[in-house]
Amino acid sequence: MHTADLPATPQRDRNIPASAWVEAPDAVLHAGDDIGIPPGRVDYKRRLGRWLLWRAGPATKADARYVAVAADDLTAHHTFRLFPDGTGEGTGPSGKMHARFRSWKEDLNQ
């Protein structure tokens, strides 16, 4: 699957693994390496403005990492780390540090 083929909305019936993305940058392929998530468990979630959102790990309270990659510049990316206790941290495109996933996503939509 190429970048242009990634759908805008969430895919509820199937996951698109990062390994199926032809142009996948290392930031996505290895998003879960340090938290024990293999590349096969990094899945595409949706587009947020110019950003392609990927998640390494489960959506529930557990070790997970979201990676947003700019569709028009695959070298530009931002991450948000979720911790098992429900806390998180990540820097958005504005350069601001976020403790909440929602505010990080809102930063991506600016």
Image (tube, rainbow, N blue to C red):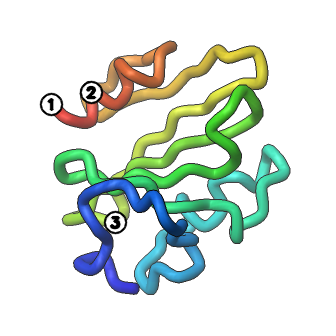
Question: Contact, CB < 8 Å: mark 3 with mark 1?
Answer: no
Is label 2 in a helix, a strand or a loop?
helix
Mark 3 residue type: Leu
Residue 106 position within the rendered picture, expressed as x and y whole percent measured from the top left:
27, 26
Residue located beneath label 1 in the image: 110
Residue located beneath label 3 in the image: 74
Is label 1 in a helix, a strand or a loop?
loop
Residue 23 position within the rendered picture, expressed as x and y whole percent measured from the top left:
41, 80
Tell me which residue sits at (80%, 44%) in the image.
Answer: 35
Question: Contact, CB < 8 Å: mark 2 with mark 1?
Answer: yes
In front of the other: 79 or 53? 53
Tell me which residue sits at (62%, 60%) in the image.
Answer: 42
The span from disc 2 to disc 3 (Cα, nearest Å) is 18 Å
Mark 2 residue type: Asp
Residue 69 position within the rendered picture, expressed as x and y whole percent measured from the top left:
37, 55
Residue located beneath label 2 in the image: 107
Residue 57 sits above or below residue 98 on the image:
below
Q: Quadrant of residue 74?
A: bottom left
The span from disc 3 to disc 1 (Cα, nearest Å) is 18 Å
